[in-house]
Image (cartoon, rainbow, N blue to C red):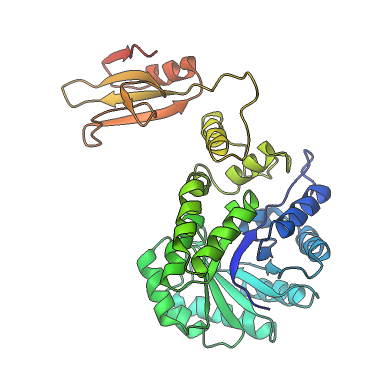
Amino acid sequence: MQLRGCGTALVTPFHQDSSIDDAAFRNLVTWQVESGIDFLVPCGTTGETPTLTHEEWLFVIDTAIEVVAGRVPIVAGATSNSTHDAVEKAKEVAARPGVDAILTASPYYNKPTQEGQYRHFKAIAEAVGEKPVILYNVPARTGSNLEPATLARLAEIPNIVGVKEASGNMTQIAEAIHSVPETFLVFSGDDAATLPVIALGGVGVISVVANEIPHEMGAMTRAALNNDWTAARALNRKYLPLMNANFIESSPLPVKAVLAMMGKIEEVYRLPLLPMRRDTRSRLQKIAIGVGLITQPAGAAEAVEFYIYENWAAGPHKIVLHRGSCGQCSHGKGRPAGHDTNHARWHGPYAALPEAREAAHGMTGILIRSECKCV
């Protein structure tokens, strides 16, 4: 098994009654493999794994194994903030034929020290024998950062073979790649950072956006790994808005919303996650249309968004309502030209003018209210 390139951190589709949508998941996995993805990661954070029961967790992994049928490697997610539970989960999934490696994240909430993280991951690796283990560093979600010096110690354990690095700190990622052996696998954990991580010596990405564009993300990653930076940059430029869209709201809300727009799944989440807000959904739909994933319905008018511009540079605060397409606004985003963040701010988008007006009237301490001619 050679893990390299683009792997998809799979979503878990649900029915409206919150049960797992087996058919949608099977179709999604089949489409991923047929689209040329390099490997698959069921039951990562993107799969809403914290909300799955133990039986559901195993069902998703077993279903992925069955559908893939050995065509691409499977890296199964197995994480817990209890070391004992993480060890038991890792042992259980490692024993399953068809699981090629295990992805396990830093313990969440506990905020362990570097030594605590070292011992946690060491215990997992030792418990699964020779099964390859990939660590997952995502401080924004776990509250713990796996520092390069600790990663270097963990890289000495024979079956800890790589890391998914999602710290968002390129200096740290560069230091981490420098600290580990050249054979150690460093994957980007952020889609938008894929090319920089590969340029530093990384071997690919464990991707969220590949749920929506598996062929394109795979092609971009392989182009970079083959030093075809012209092709890699062209794909990155085209799909970067979609990569960044996964930060509009908490993942996996945006990716599941787009997959629903594409007709791949139903847009259903489990609490504590809720459906996307109307304004952010409108933005997401525009991005999906812009990159060609979905089309605007025939005869449908383009959705209009509204923004509030708040300016307090010259005395009392003043707010002005704008359409997103206002000719007085730069980049078509309702932001007036010459916007100075030291003396002003803007709010929105709002899906309808009444919604924007209501928000404007709800702002306290604002003495002057008006509307641009575009409204």
The residue drawn where x is 82% and y is 67% is: 69
The residue drawn where x is 39% and y is 63% is: 169
Seen in the picture, residue 56 relative to 1 is either above or below; the reply is above
Residue 192 is left or right of residue 35, and the answer is left
Which quarter of the figure has residue 105?
bottom right
The residue drawn where x is 74% and y is 57% is: 34
Q: Quadrant of the C terminus?
A: top left
Is residue 109 at least partly visible in the picture? Answer: no
Question: Residue 279: percent from the left, percent from the top?
Answer: 52, 29
Seen in the picture, residue 344 relative to 191 is either above or below; the reply is above
Q: Quadrant of the N terminus?
A: bottom right
Which quarter of the figure has residue 256?
top right
Question: Residue 244: percent from the left, percent from the top?
Answer: 48, 47
Residue 215 is left or right of residue 373, and the answer is right
Q: Nearer the viewer, residue 157 or 161?
A: 161
Is residue 72 at least partly visible in the picture? Answer: yes
The residue drawn where x is 62% and y is 58% is: 45
Question: Residue 321: percent from the left, percent from the top?
Answer: 36, 18
Q: How many marks?
A: 0
Q: Nearer the viewer, residue 290 or 27?
A: 290
Which quarter of the figure has residue 373?
top left
Q: Nearer the viewer, residue 4 or 252?
A: 4
Residue 316 is left or right of residue 138, and the answer is left
Question: Residue 227: percent from the left, percent from the top?
Answer: 47, 68
